[in-house]
Amino acid sequence: MLICGKIFVVVAVLAIILIGIFSYLFFIDRKINKLEKEVEEKMARAKK
Amino acid sequence: MIKKDWWKLLSGILLLYAIIAGFFTSIPLKPVTEESMRNLYFHVGMWFGMFSMLITGFIFSLKYLKKFDEMMDIMAVEAINVGLLFGILGICTGMVWANFTWGTPWVKDPKLNGAAVGIFIYLAYMILRGSIDDVHKRAKVAAVYNILAFILWIVFVIILPRLAGESIHPGAGHNEVPVMPMHLDPSMRLVFYPAMAGWILLGFWIFQIRVKMRKIKRNIDNI
């Protein structure tokens, strides 16, 4: 019933947006992990 | 990486499932709401995301007052930040939905007004934090206020609307719309529960990113 109304196009668009946002969050997460380590190393060096 | 972060992937899969199954499975059509009942997977998800974050903030504020560990204060404020994001999105999506079911974006209703007051209580938390310069004093005052805020929030959003008894919004009073998950149609429950889990996990993910961000900021300030 819903298949006839081309609702699947909307679902496909939503799915792409969701996957896009999640991949983006994932890369932000990775970047911030690296930054966290970098700052911690700098702090350790500054203490020496 | 995968070992530690599996729940992030799970959140994505659950929400993807919610979108696909949420649109494709047929649902029992009720008068007035009809197909818009599918909003349950998304609008209510905002509420679950907010509530899990507010509880998290509440717990970390209690923890802060126990040991006065600055990290606990950071966790508390960021949990509330994410909770506010979900709360505001919940109100906005609710207004869109209300406009099409009740004919107006805002109804003078105990549940809706309670939710708005709840948002203001937590906005006040942010303003309170912003107004105190001393770090330790700020953390202490904020933790005490946050505990109070959580209790007030429960009163305004959960207890008072129930006492008022006649809310147009499901989940308060006695109205026809099935809102407690156990009253939901079984076919909808299959999508509803995974969707809620997905939203909650997404909230924790954003929360974690924000905490890391603030930790970095604090470390930079300390160098």
Image: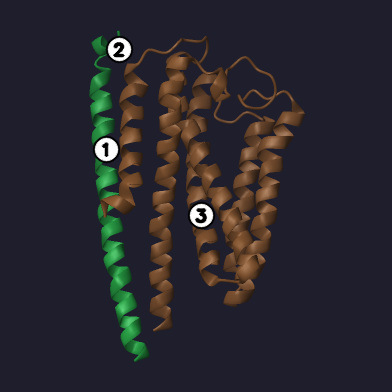
Chain colours: A green, B brown
Q: Which residue is mark 1?
A: A17
B169 relative to A18 in the view: left or right: right
Q: Secondary structure at mark 3?
A: helix
Q: Residue at x 40, y 52 (%)?
A: B206
Q: Which residue is mark 2?
A: A2
The chain letter under disc 3 is B
* Residue A34 x %, y %: 27, 67
Taking A2 as reference, is B48 above or below it?
Answer: below
Q: Amino acid at mark 1?
A: Ile
State the separation of the CA atoms marked 2 and 3: 39 Å
Marks 1, 3: nearer the viewer: 3
Q: Residue at x 40, y 72 (%)?
A: B217
Image-quadrant location for residue B155: top right
Taking B3 as reference, is B19 above or below it?
Answer: above
Q: Residue at x 69, y 32 (%)?
A: B110
B173 relative to B8 in the view: left or right: right
